[in-house]
Image: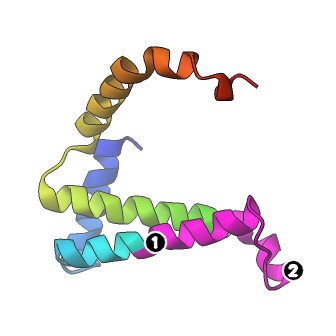
Amino acid sequence: MTIKEAQTTVDNWINTIGIRYYNELTNTAILTEEVGEVARLMARIYGEQSFKTKEQELTAKDDLAGEMADVLFVLICLANQTGIDLTEALKKSLNKKTKRDTERHANNKKLKD
């Protein structure tokens, strides 16, 4: 699925099953909540925090994938609501980063390990 297809798919889902978009502020709050859920799992899977139960640890990677998908879904909702073509936005962002960081990262001694 392309980014454009994802934007169309989410829009169709929102306008049929979801009835309508939440307002932009509500979706921004939901996005923040979803990113927090990704952070919680990252701290437990890759960081020093531990899981409360062994069962939680066993399902953590699947849970992480689901939480990342939730972040993407809400981000797509916000893009649709604000008229942003995420494909074009990502292209511009990558172009900007390429111009800005071509030598920066190559010369970063911290990355050469």
Q: Which residue is mark 1?
A: 34
The kind of residue tagged 1 is Glu
Neighbours of disc 1 within 10 Å: few (<14), some (14-19), many (20+) = many
Give the image location of residue 56, x and y in percent: 77, 79
Span highlighted in magenta in the image: 33-62
Residue 105: which disc?
A: none
The alpha-carbon separation of the residues under discs 2 and 1 comes to 23 Å
The kind of residue tagged 2 is Lys
- In the picture, measured across the screen, residue 10 lies left or right of residue 53, that is left
- Residue that lies at the very extreme toward the left in this rendered image: 83
Residue 54: which disc?
A: 2
Placement of the N terminus among the 4 image quadrants: top left
User: Nearest the camera: 81 or 13?
Assistant: 81
Neighbours of disc 2 within 10 Å: few (<14), some (14-19), many (20+) = few
Place residue 28 in its image quadrant.
bottom left
Does the magenta run of residues contain 75? no
User: Circle 1 sits in a helix, a strand or a loop, which is it?
Assistant: helix
Give the image location of residue 60, x and y in percent: 72, 69
Place residue 27 in its image quadrant.
bottom left
Question: How many numbered discs?
Answer: 2
